[in-house]
Image (cartoon, rainbow, N blue to C red):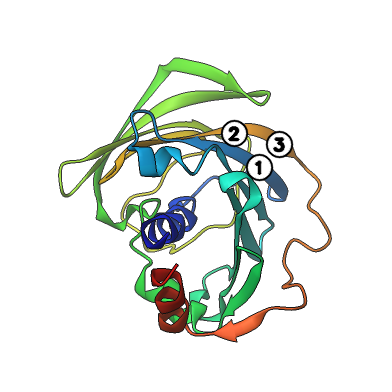
Amino acid sequence: MKKLTKIAFTLLLFVNVSMNAQTALKNGSVTYSMTMPGASEEMAAMGESTITVNFNEKIQATDMNMMGGMMLMKTIVPVGNEKDSKMTVEVMGMKYEITDAGAEATKNNNGLGNLENAKDIVYDKKDTKEIVGFKCYKATVTMNDGSTSVFYITEAIAPQVQKPDAKIKLTGYPLEMTVQTAQGDMVMKAIKFSKDVPVDAFTVGEGFTKVTMEEFQKQMGGM
């Protein structure tokens, strides 16, 4: 469980990709399926996971559903203000709100989806595919550690810009991503897009016990 929780936190950072598209949709909801081909038995136990990203020009919320609903995680991140981030976790019937999520978001801002550690992007507009109704083309990102990530991006969707001083930015929004991780390749592919954002997308529900990240991880380590 502890390893699965760590992976889940990593995945939540995955979708925080810097953007610079200007003339495109700026409000919407994208749902991805997440798989790890060739994963270990422990990873396979997660089953199929889904990640939904709701966004507008001011805020982004990411909802993850793992192990058939046994683990639900949510982050709410204001644009350009990670310190005010919020995070909730529902697991095994228990509900937690991570009180220092903002500090963790700032500290962990070099996640898989963050391109601060990228050294190069190569675009291939001849390599295209249609995903949830959007034409996408290929972008191959090489990281400083030599690993590569493959994105299929569309310029028709533009979530909020993060870190305008970032050296590397994608020219579109990713609807399919294959990223190398310590556990093997992780593949996320959009399976649904909507221009409508749920009214409760950017709020924390009721009944959550407030704990620090350290307290939460200790509890999960004991399960």
Q: Is residue 175 left or right of residue 42?
A: right
Q: What residue type is disc 2 on?
A: Ala
Query: Is the C-beta separation of discs 2 and 1 under 8 Å?
Result: yes
The residue labelled by disc 2 is 190
Q: What residue type is disc 1 on?
A: Val
Gap in angstroms between the C-alphas marked 3 and 1: 5 Å
Residue drawn at the location 44% of the way across and 72% of the way down: 105
Q: What residue type is disc 3 on?
A: Phe
User: Which of the labelled discs sits on residue 193, or is there none?
Assistant: 3
Q: Return the residue found at the far top.
A: 126
Q: Return the residue found at the far front.
A: 223
Q: Nearest the camera: 149 or 41?
A: 41
Q: Residues within 10 Å of mark 3 (few under 14, many from 20)?
A: some
User: Which of the labelled discs sits on residue 81, or is there none?
Assistant: none
Q: Residue 114 falls in which quadrant of the image?
A: bottom left
Instruction: Label 2: state its secondary structure.
Output: strand
Gap in angstroms between the C-alphas marked 2 and 1: 7 Å
Q: Is residue 149 left or right of residue 143?
A: right
Residue drawn at the location 62% of the way across and 44% of the way down: 68
123 to 106, vertically: above or below: above
Residue drawn at the location 43% of the way across and 59% of the way down: 1
Instruction: Label 1: state its secondary structure.
Output: strand
- Locate residue 84, reporting x and y percent: 56, 80
Query: Is the C-beta separation of discs 3 and 1 under 8 Å?
Result: yes
Gap in angstroms between the C-alphas marked 2 and 3: 8 Å
The residue labelled by disc 1 is 30
Q: Nearest the camera: 145 or 58?
A: 145
